[in-house]
Amino acid sequence: MAKPIVLDQEWLERIATQVNGLEYGSVLITVHDGRVVQIDRTERKRFDAASSKQQQPQSQTQSQSQQAHQQSQQQRQSAGNGSADKLKAVGG
């Protein structure tokens, strides 16, 4: 039969410290012979792709958009002989 887990105030505070401020991640509590012997904290940082695009200055985003539009127009004009539906990679 398993031994009951012994948790004193010190371990409870240690566990609370590891959980506090954790936005994404996990806390792993290792128990040996009914006693907590280790706490592992794994923290994840998540970055939203949409928010990183919003951080770019708007004028820079607009100029990049205008450049891409001009390049695609030039490609369509240079194709001319029925190959306008082909895609070409644009660096950027």
Image (cartoon, rainbow, N blue to C red):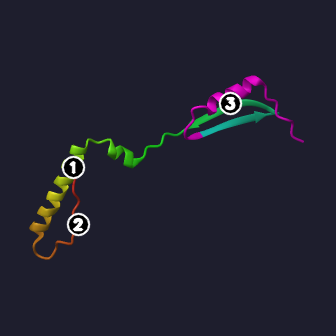
Rate crowding at label 1 as few (under 14), some (14 to 19) or many (20 or more) other CA atoms within 10 Å.
few
Q: Give how far across and how far down residue 44 sits, in percent.
A: 52, 40
- Whether 58 is drawn above or below 19: the answer is below
Rate crowding at label 3 as few (under 14), some (14 to 19) or many (20 or more) other CA atoms within 10 Å.
some
- The answer for how far apart the CA atoms under marks 3 and 2 are is 55 Å
- The answer for how far apart the CA atoms under marks 1 and 2 are is 22 Å
Q: Nearer the viewer, residue 74 or 81?
A: 74
What residue is pinned by disc 3? 15
Look at label 1 and name its amino acid.
Gln
> Relative to residue 14, is residue 76 drawn left or right?
left
> Relative to residue 47, is residue 56 drawn left or right?
left
Q: Pick out the residue farthest to the bottom.
A: 82
Give the structural element (helix, strand or loop) at label 1: helix
Q: Pick out the residue farthest to the front.
A: 58
Among the two numbered marks 1 and 3 on one chain, the one whose residue lies closer to the N terminus: 3
Look at label 2 and name its amino acid.
Leu
- Whether 48 is drawn above or below 7: the answer is below
- The answer for how far apart the CA atoms under marks 1 and 3 are is 49 Å
- Give yes or no for residue 10 being in the magenta stretch: yes
Magenta residue span = 1-25
Q: Nearer the viewer, mark 1 or mark 3?
A: 1
Quarter of the N terminus within the rendering: top right
Give the structural element (helix, strand or loop) at label 3: helix
